[in-house]
Image (spheres, helix red, strand yellow):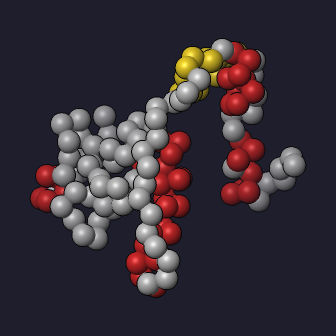
Amino acid sequence: MPRTDYLRGALAESLDAQGYVQVDSGLRVLGQERVFAIGDISDADRNMAGFAGQQGELLAANLRAQITGEGETVAYERRPALILVPLGPEGGAGQLPGQGVIGPDATAEIKGRAMLVEHSTGHFDAPGEA
């Protein structure tokens, strides 16, 4: 359950029965013109925190287009659910869209060996592997 209990007024009215902020295809809070929600509190890709970065990038580009008048806004496309649960560097399981359940070899290859740390090294000015 998302931590949205602090919302009041019209924003609280935008919550669904599970407490998620309902958003439209532009990630705009339903019933609002200038309020947006992404990540764990929004109902876009619910319970899929891994997509928050993509939501943020799309929202930033759309806001830039609206503010500058340059470019077109793009609708956010909700993603099918996926899950990867590594168990150590060589084990685990997952479910991927279009592939169904995957076993330990595929899970380790995608996430288990380095826990996707290589995607974050640039944020910390750490040397990464090419």
Q: Residue at x 47, y 54 (%)?
A: 55
Q: Quadrant of residue 8?
A: bottom left
**Tag count:** 0
Q: Does 76 sit above or below residue 49?
A: below
Asked whether the viewer can see residue 23, the reply is yes
Residue 76 point in image, percent of width and height: 43, 54
Residue 119 point in image, percent of width and height: 70, 47
Q: Does 125 sit above or below residue 117?
A: below
Q: Of all residues shown, which one is farthest toward the bottom?
A: 68
Q: Residue at x 71, y 41 (%)?
A: 117
Q: Does 35 sit above or below residue 117?
A: below
Q: Does 98 sit above or below residue 2?
A: above
- The residue nearer to you, when weighing 91 against 45, is 45
Q: Quadrant of residue 78?
A: top left
Residue 69 point in image, percent of width and height: 44, 84
Q: Residue at x 12, y 59 (%)?
A: 9
Does residue 18 appear left or right of residue 81 in this picture? left
